[in-house]
Amino acid sequence: MASVRIDGDDLVVEIEGMDRLWSLKSRLVIPLANVRGATADPGIAAEPKGLRAPGTSLPGVITAGTFHQDGERVFWNIRDGARAVVIELADEHYARLVVEVVDPAATVALIEQVVLR
């Protein structure tokens, strides 16, 4: 699970609990200028992830870490796809962040509110 918040001009994604170990990350800080938007996408868990490097993947259990697909890096941290949020980025190490959050609708609203400014 992850928590997402705005801190000044940055989007901060904090990876919680044991997911830090599985994803090999504890925190991602992205300038808001590089955040393009966010969507709740419960179906994304069933989509192909690409090559894992480094990270953890146990289908149906957890997907966490960096995955390479179609020339892009995507950061994943989900267990329950029903709570997945996809954050689209530009000019960053990752093209997208796919994270599980407690309230996908609220997280998307938070991100969309600051992106539209």
Image (cartoon, grey):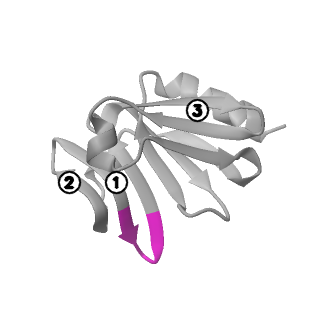
Q: Which is nearer the N-term, disc 3 or disc 2?
A: 2
Residue at 37 percent across and 38 percent down: it is 42
Which of pointers 3 and 1 indicates the residue nearer the eye? 1
Q: Are marks 3 and 1 in contact (CB under 8 Å)?
A: no
Residue at 62 percent across and 62 percent down: it is 92
Which amino acid, by three-letter code, is at mark 2? Ser
Q: Are marks 1 and 2 in contact (CB under 8 Å)?
A: yes
- As displayed, is residue 109 above or below residue 79? above
Q: Label 2, on which residue?
A: 57
Q: Label 1, on which residue?
A: 65
Residue 51 in view in this figure = yes
Q: Label 3, on which residue?
A: 108
- Label 3, secondary structure: give it: helix
* Residue furthest right as drawn: 117
Quadrant for the N terminus, please.
Answer: top left
User: Which residue range is magenta in the image?
Assistant: 67-73
Q: Which is nearer the N-term, disc 1 or disc 2?
A: 2
Whether residue 97 sits left or right of residue 12 in the image: it is left
How far across and how far down the image is residue 63, in percent?
26, 49
How far across and how far down the image is residue 43, in percent?
34, 44
- Label 1, secondary structure: give it: strand
* Residue furthest bottom as drawn: 71
